[in-house]
Amino acid sequence: MTGESLPAERRQGISRVYNASTSDVKLWLAEPNVLVVLNFHSSTCPASKALSPKLDAMAIKYAEHSAIMKVNVGRPGEAATMAMNEYQIDETPVLKFFLNGKEVDELRSVQNDEKLERAFKKHTEKIKGEFTMKEGELPGSQNQRSVEDMMVRGKRGDLPAGITRVRVPEGAKDVTEGLAKSILSNSPVAEELVEDAKE
């Protein structure tokens, strides 16, 4: 890359692995100074499933400098067509690493933690230094919680992460006011809601 000057700006990476569309992939690959990792996988492939938690850990560890995207090639569609035509993917899982629009590494099949760590460290080291951070959001950059995360309560009184209990102002009406007694008495969930409302 001698003689080429790279942009002195970059975008924050992503702290989670997310399912990307073909347009998401193109947007991220056009970004300078961020390590983009494409995980070509299939939801029915045991090796893809085994690799998944390892990539989740890498996404958290290298969130500042990398964006890891899952591209599901296990079913017919736009993603599978892109994988075969543009990236010659003929097996899963395959990890392709891109930096400044160029492919810099490829790993096939399940990788041990050390090999994954070496690849991420090697390529993110090239991004260290003084950069102007770009504004605006790209797909996947919002760390959204899943519906399951928001709905699951471990035990009574527990609230999902990111939700806090608020004090009900004096004079506020009971949330169960006006509901038929038969509805309230036949549902254990409704009974719990009534109890919570009284606290």
Image (cartoon, helix red, strand yellow):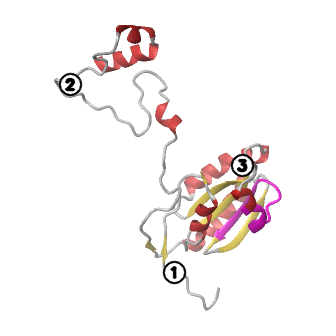
Place of residue 5 in the rendered image (x, y in percent of width and height, measured from the top left): 56, 86
Residue furthest bottom as drawn: 3
Circles 3 and 1: CB atoms closer than 8 Å: no
Label 1: how many Cα within 10 Å (few below 14, some 14–19, many 20+): few
Residue furthest left as drawn: 171
Q: Which mark is residue 117?
A: none
Three-letter code, disc 2: Ala
Of the residues under marks 1 and 2, which one precedes in the sequence?
Answer: 1
Q: Name the residue under label 2.
A: 172
**Quarter location, residue 68:** bottom right
Place of residue 181 in the rendered image (x, y in percent of width and height, measured from the top left): 35, 8
Q: Is residue 28 magenta?
A: no
Of the residues under marks 3 and 2, which one precedes in the sequence?
Answer: 3
How far apart are labels 3 and 1 at the CA level?
33 Å
Say whether residue 6 is left or right of residue 76: left
Magenta-highlighted residues: 82-98
Q: Which of 190 and 46 is in front in this view?
A: 190
**Quarter location, residue 174:** top left
Q: Name the residue under label 1.
A: 7
